[in-house]
Amino acid sequence: MYTFHFNKEVLAMPTLRPSTAGDACMSRSGLYRAAREGRLERIARGIYLPADAPAADWDWIEAATRRRDATICLTSALAYHELTVVIPAALDVAIPRGSRTPATTGAIAWHQFDRPTFEIGREEIPIPGTDQTIGIYSAERSIADAFRMRGEVGYELAREALKEWLRRGGKPTHLMEIASRLPRAKSPLLQALEALA
């Protein structure tokens, strides 16, 4: 009978795909057998975690696995930065405009952002429970995006996030610097800052 063992390298990289089964010293058929036997848990089509892996956000893992440039944005990024109490129904993830939108099984809302501005305010954060990382937009970029896409996310969300960010000591000059580099963000954000002043 096949016994599934994790070596140190695999413990550092618990997410497995059929193409990475060799990293766990197993064949593709061994990976599928381990999943059938309950030693691996299928979190999405073609993505597996060890059954005893630490708790992790499966949508984050699926988004990062499907697209290396996946970036948490809009309401999901505002929630991560604790700038809203709104709990998004799906994980908001940006990819560069013109990219193929991946087929996913998780609750992921894919958004296409302009390529020339895609990297503005983007950073990488670790996905807890894995060795993977995922992109996320900074609080400032997320607020600017909420204002420029207020028709999609709602003006109140943008305004409340801005108020909370200012209450915490956010610097409007830094926010306006980012907003001036994004289409349709500067004017509504400036109006909101003036109204709150």
Image (cartoon, rainbow, N blue to C red):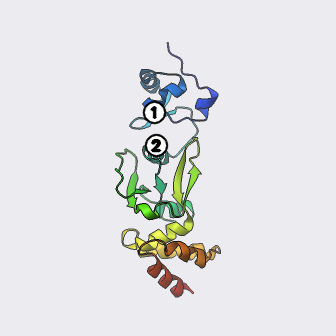
Mark 1 Cα-neighbour bin, 10 Å: few <14, some 14–19, many ≥20: some
Looking at numbered disc 1 in the image, what kind of residue is underneath it?
Arg
The residue lying at 45 percent from left, 81 percent from top is 187
Q: Quadrant of residue 116?
A: bottom left
Q: Position of residue 185 (x, y in %)?
A: 45, 75
Q: x%, y% of residue 33?
A: 43, 22
Q: Is residue 28 left or right of residue 129?
A: left
Pick the residue in front: 115 or 196: 115
Tell me: residue 157, above or below residue 17: below
- Residue 74, image x, y percentages: 46, 64
Q: Is residue 138 above or below residue 171?
A: above
Q: Is residue 111 visible?
A: yes
Most foreground residue, 38 or 111: 111
Q: Answer yes or no: do the residues labelled 1 and 2 have beta carbons within 8 Å?
A: yes
| Total numbered labels | 2
Task: Please tell me the numbered disc located at residue 81.
Answer: none
**Element assignment for label 1:** loop
Amino acid at dot 2: Thr
| In this view, 84 is above or below 103 | below
Which residue is farthest front? Answer: 116
Q: Which residue: 54% across, 77% down?
A: 176
In the rendered structure, find residue 65 and report the number of the disc placed on it.
Answer: 2
Left or right position of 169 against 162 = right
Q: Quadrant of the C terminus?
A: bottom right
Please give the label number shown on residue 17.
1
Give me the C-alpha separation between circle 1 and circle 2.
9 Å
> Can you see residue 83?
no
Q: What residue is rendered at 40% in x and 68% in y?
A: 153
